[in-house]
Image (cartoon, rainbow, N blue to C red):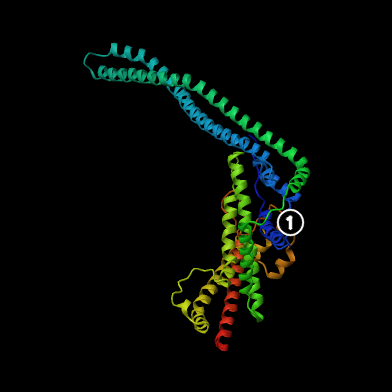
């Protein structure tokens, strides 16, 4: 089975976290047609991402997509059988190597002991009766005979193991090659079917659109549309009037922006599963990349959660208060919020600045962060080479094989803290309005 030797470039990871949400937001906010239609770009996207499962034909309501599923299932079965054969082959090779090393070690020992037997017997015959020399010769002769017996026993077991393991090694190797070839041929068959479907895709889309019949909107679709409209209305209702409105809109926009990172996780983990179980090529970047991404999402979405009051809290007494009393309570307790948010901002800034000061390369930015050059000297020496030359590594990096720079994530912590403080200022201003107006 062919493998996938692909490691996501660092620049692609960080740019993808920016570009993908922008494109997704533009597509999600575009006007939707009243009539449901199948589109060729989406069909090709599904072909590329899920064609190995036949999802492109299932998207077009074509039952021939079910043909892909048993072939894909066979690939998984063949890979599993190949992995089992590989484990068995590894165990058999280990036993075979142990037996061969035993033969290599014991044969010289037995030969050496056999060569000593004649000398020890001659020494025993010439030794004086009941003397120390006679007893010493007897003990050494007994030990030599014991070594010969033990060595011959070990040699017999090792030779028997070699005779037993050699056919098994050959059999396991043949099984592994068979299942690897079977999985590869099945995969090539799916690729051929996908190539044919890529040529037929325009016709399949036209046929699917021609088969669309006017059907009344189901209750589930109506409920979904109603829920989407309600969510949009609820989000917009949190935007305040006056100068604080831009802060609320910024929090809403940032919350929507990072929400699409969850879609990225779906694609990445799908790629990881396919790479691991179909191509036997687990990645060294998927888990860490998504781990970092969700950490940044948590930080950036904090302002959105505060705006929409999505944080978990116990409000048994608070819920029954009037709007003015709620505002007074919010103003009183806001001091604890600003202590937390201020501490988060200061510590995040320290972490972020330390991250770019790590002397992991010869970057002028790291030199400036460590105080070795001035700010203007750093700007004068800064060039595109700092970002594109692979020999220049600057800032804190992860400890695994991917070695992704961690300083961008540390600066996202600063951004999240700033957004949280801004939203706290907006909330405090609205509470002050409520108290002053007496609403």
The residue depicted at 65 percent of the width and 72 percent of the height is 249
Quadrant assignment, res 393: bottom right
Compare residues 84 and 5 and report the one nearer the observer.
84
Where residue 237 sits: x, y (%)? 62, 74
Compare residues 258 and 36 and report the one nearer the observer.
36
The residue depicted at 72 percent of the width and 35 percent of the height is 192
Helix, strand or loop status at disc 1: loop
Q: In the picture provided, is 131 more to the left or to the right than 209?
A: left
Where residue 354 sits: x, y (%)? 58, 64
Q: Is residue 285 visible?
A: no
Quadrant assignment, res 119: top left
Quadrant assignment, res 64: top right
Quadrant of the frame with the C terminus = bottom right
Compare residues 74 and 151 and report the one nearer the observer.
74
Q: Is residue 347 visible?
A: yes
Quadrant of the frame with the N terminus = top right
In this view, 356 is above or below 45: below
Where residue 321 sits: x, y (%)? 48, 81
In this view, 214 is above or below 119: below
In this view, 210 is above or below 132: below
Compare residues 187 and 296 and report the one nearer the observer.
187
Where residue 131 sits: x, y (%)? 23, 17
Q: Residues within 10 Å of mark 1 (few under 14, many from 20)?
A: few
For disc 1, the marked residue is 35
The residue depicted at 24 percent of the width and 14 percent of the height is 128
């Amino acid at each position: 089975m062919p493998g996938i030797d692909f490691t996501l470039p660092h620049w692609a990871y960080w740019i993808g976290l920016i570009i993908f949400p922008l494109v997704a937001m533009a597509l999600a906010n575009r006007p939707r047609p009243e009539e449901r239609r199948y589109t060729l770009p989406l069909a090709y996207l599904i072909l590329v991402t899920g064609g190995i499962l036949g999802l492109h034909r299932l998207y077009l309501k074509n039952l021939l997509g079910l043909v892909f599923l048993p072939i894909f299932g066979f690939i998984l079965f063949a890979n599993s059988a190949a992995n089992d054969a590989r484990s068995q082959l590894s165990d058999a090779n280990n036993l075979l190597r142990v037996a061969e090393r035993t033969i290599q070690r014991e044969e010289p020992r037995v030969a050496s002991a056999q060569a000593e037997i004649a000398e020890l017997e001659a020494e025993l015959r010439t030794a004086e009766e009941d003397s120390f020399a006679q007893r010493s010769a007897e003990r050494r002769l007994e030990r030599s005979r014991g070594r010969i017996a033990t060595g011959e026993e070990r040699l017999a077991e090792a030779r028997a193991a070699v005779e037993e393991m050699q056919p098994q090694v050959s059999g396991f190797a043949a099984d592994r090659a068979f299942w690897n070839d079977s999985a590869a041929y099945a995969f090539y068959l799916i690729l051929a079917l996908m190539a044919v479907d890529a040529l037929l895709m325009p016709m399949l889309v036209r046929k699917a659109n021609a088969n669309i019949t006017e059907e009344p909107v189901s209750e589930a679709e109506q409920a979904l549309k109603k829920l989407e409209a309600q969510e949009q209305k609820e989000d917009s209702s949190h935007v305040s009037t006056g100068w604080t409105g831009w802060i609320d809109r910024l929090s809403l926009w940032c919350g929507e922006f990072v929400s699409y990172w969850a879609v990225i996780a779906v694609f990445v983990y799908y790629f990881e599963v396919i790479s691991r179980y179909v191509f036997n090529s687990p990645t060294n970047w998927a888990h860490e990349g998504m781990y970092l991404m969700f950490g940044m999402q948590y930080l950036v979405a904090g302002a959105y959660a505060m705006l929409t009051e999505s944080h978990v809290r116990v409000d048994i007494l608070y819920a029954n208060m009037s709007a003015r009393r709620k505002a007074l309570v919010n103003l009183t307790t806001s001091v604890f919020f600003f202590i937390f948010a201020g501490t988060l901002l200061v510590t995040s800034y320290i972490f972020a600045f330390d991250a770019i000061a790590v002397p992991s390369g010869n970057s002028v930015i790291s030199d400036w962060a460590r105080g070795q050059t001035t700010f203007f000297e750093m700007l004068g020496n800064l060039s595109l080479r700092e970002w594109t030359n692979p020999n220049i590594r600057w800032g804190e990096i992860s400890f695994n094989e991917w070695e992704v720079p961690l300083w961008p994530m540390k600066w996202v912590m600063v951004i999240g803290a700033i957004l949280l403080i801004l939203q706290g200022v907006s909330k405090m201003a609205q509470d002050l309005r409520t108290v002053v107006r007496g609403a």
